Amino acid sequence: MQPRFETLPETPLAGQRQRLSLLADTTAALWQSFGQRLRARPFARSAERYSVQRYDATYFRPFRPEALFEKWAAVAVARAADVPADLELLVLPAGHYAVFDYQGPASGGPAVFRHLLLEWLPASGYELDDRPHFEVLSAHYRPDDPTAEEQIWLPVKPCLARPL
């Protein structure tokens, strides 16, 4: 998988979140709850959905599947004031991203992320930046669809020091 590089402008999102781990993954319940709210009152700027992960600065050192992180189900809004009272605001900060196009079921995600983080990233000349990671999904995305398409956005910055 080869990325394209994009600079994301500051992007306000409306959504809901949970703390979870890879071992106790409640993503499906989060999206089900969020989908019900979204159907009741459309307010999104576009039909795309954002699956956002916010990791503590030390989450990947050392990586532990039981470590907690924050998971968001969200949509973009034009302004922070557009966030309904029963949802929360998450502002994606502006920054540089490596963007990968993935096609396949969500069950293939762990292998894709292992490849990106353990193979592509160390050889890329980039390192992870301390900003949210996210995937952009179409409004009709189905996690079990083998033809499902998503964009994987990894926050990156140039490596300052490369090991010899």
Image (spheres, rainbow, N blue to C red):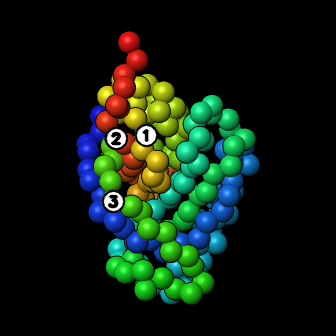
What amino acid type should be assigned to the residue bearing mark 2?
Lys
Q: Residue, x 42% and y 59% (percent of image)?
A: 137
Q: Which residue is mark 3?
A: 94
Dot 3, how many residues are within 10 Å of its Cα: few (below 14), some (14-19), or many (20+)?
few
Q: Position of residue 29 (x, y in %)?
A: 67, 63
Compare marks 3 and 2 and give the one earlier in the sequence: 3
Where disc 3 sits, the SS reads: loop
Question: What count of labels does the image hold?
Answer: 3
**Marking on residue 128:** 1
Q: Residue furthest front?
A: 161
Where disc 1 sits, the SS reads: strand
Left or right of 5, for residue 69: right
Q: Position of residue 107 (x, y in %)?
A: 57, 43
Vertical arrangement, residue 42 with respect to residue 25, above or below:
below
Q: Position of residue 5 (x, y in %)?
A: 26, 44
- Label 3 with label 2: CB-CB less than 8 Å: no
Compare marks 3 and 1 and give the one earlier in the sequence: 3
Compare marks 1 and 2 and give the one earlier in the sequence: 1
Dot 1, how many residues are within 10 Å of its Cα: few (below 14), some (14-19), or many (20+)?
some
Vertical arrangement, residue 39 with respect to residue 120, above or below:
below
Q: CA distance from mark 1 to mark 2?
A: 6 Å
Quadrant housing the C terminus: top left
What amino acid type should be assigned to the residue bearing mark 3?
Ala
- Label 1 with label 2: CB-CB less than 8 Å: yes
Q: Which residue is mark 2?
A: 157
